[in-house]
Image: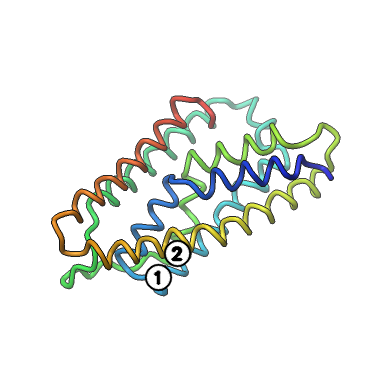
Amino acid sequence: MSIAFASFVFFAVSVIGTPGPANMVLMAAGAKFGFKSSLPFVFGVCIGKQIIIWPIGFGLLEAASGAPLVFSLLKWVSAAYMIWLAWRVANMRFQVKEDIEKVPGFIAGLLVHPFNPKAWALITTSFTAFTYDNSPVFQTTLIMAVIILVIQLIFHPLWTMGGVKMAQYFAGTWLEKYLMWTLGTVTLLTVLSVLVAGEL
């Protein structure tokens, strides 16, 4: 096996399954638009992480050592995008009748992880901490990509369904505003924690 399999799976579950920018956005989408309508967005989010995994697996980080300013810029652009999403989440309200906002689709979902500092931290840590020096590049990247995708296909729909359930209980109540502010704050804090740790 080209990776420390059990340790990597535990690490991936602990990161993908816990609160973070993507899961908060998925929860907000489920609360706002319902589970079925949000599914294209959910699948886009799942596939979007593959956009990060494969280039990193084939040496993007090593190539980036010659152009550190490019990755520094990417870090701040990504953070700005996720902070904007956090603001959107904080100001969302459940199922407002006069709201004609379009349901985010597959393409919108594809953008979430490439602009998510937590996703970059997960992938870079995975390749630096759980692979062996002589690991075959394609085999290692494929194993990680499949494991991460399977974990996402389990947890991302659960977070989306959690948003649906929250909407059922909190829509139209005085707690709704504070709940969405809390979700937005969790999203923001996750982004800032990654920036402070310098893991991207």
Which residue is tagged 1? 35
| Residue 120 coordinates in the image, percent (x, y) | 55, 39
Colour setup of the view: rainbow
Helix, strand or loop at mark 1? helix
Q: Is residue 162 left or right of residue 4?
A: left
| 113 or 183, nearer to the observer | 183
Counting from the top left corner in percent of width and height, residue 40 is at 47, 69
Distance from disc 1 to disc 2, alpha carbons, whole Å, reads 10 Å
Q: Quadrant of residue 196?
A: top left
Kind of residue at badge 2: Phe
On the rendered image, what quadrant is the N terminus found in? Answer: top right
Q: Residue at x 35, y 41 (%)?
A: 186
- Please give the count of numbered marks on the rendered protein: 2
Hey, what amino acid is under mark 1? Phe
Lateral position of residue 116 relative to residue 56, left or right: left
The residue closer to the viewer here, 12 or 122, is 12
What residue would you read off at disc 2?
41
